[in-house]
Amino acid sequence: MTIRNLAMAVAALGLAAAPVAAESVREAAPVSQESEVAGNSVIFIVLGVAAVIAGVIVIASDDDDSLSA
């Protein structure tokens, strides 16, 4: 029973210490310039749409000819 109580106390201490540890995490420095990838978002959208269309075509043209007797 003592080991169980000790485990519960350790778990409670861990839960209580988590917010304190989260506050001590350093924040990222502010960004001074815009990302180079930000201007290419149209290209990524077009490629994504093309990939979805290609997937639909492949699925729709799949031949389900079963050869089982």
Image (spheres, rainbow, N blue to C red):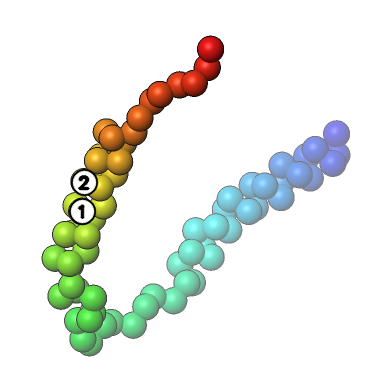
Side of 25 where 9 appears, left or right: right
Secondary structure of the residue carrying numbered label 2? helix
Side of 50 where 2 appears, left or right: right
Residue 53 disc label: 2
Contact, mark 1 vs mark 2 (Cβ under 8 Å): yes
Side of 58 where 45 appears, left or right: left
Residue 1 disc label: none
Q: Residue 61, how many percent across, how many down?
A: 28, 35
Q: Residue 28, how many percent across, how many down?
A: 37, 78
Q: Residue 37, how many percent across, how many down?
A: 23, 76
At label 2, the amino acid type is Ile
State the image quarter where residue 42 is shown.
Answer: bottom left
> For this rendering, which residue is in front, 46 or 12?
46
Q: Residue furthest top?
A: 69
Secondary structure of the residue carrying numbered label 1? helix
Q: Say above or below: 67 vs 56.
A: above
User: Crowdedness of circle 2 by 10 Å Cα count: few (<14), some, many (20+)?
Assistant: few
Residue position for label 1: 50
Distance in Å between CA atoms under marks 1 and 2: 5 Å
> For this rendering, which residue is in front, 33 or 26?
33
Q: Residue 54, how many percent across, how many down?
A: 25, 47
User: Crowdedness of circle 1 by 10 Å Cα count: few (<14), some, many (20+)?
Assistant: few
At label 1, the amino acid type is Ala
Q: Say above or below: 34 vs 17.
A: below
State the image quarter where residue 43 is shown.
Answer: bottom left
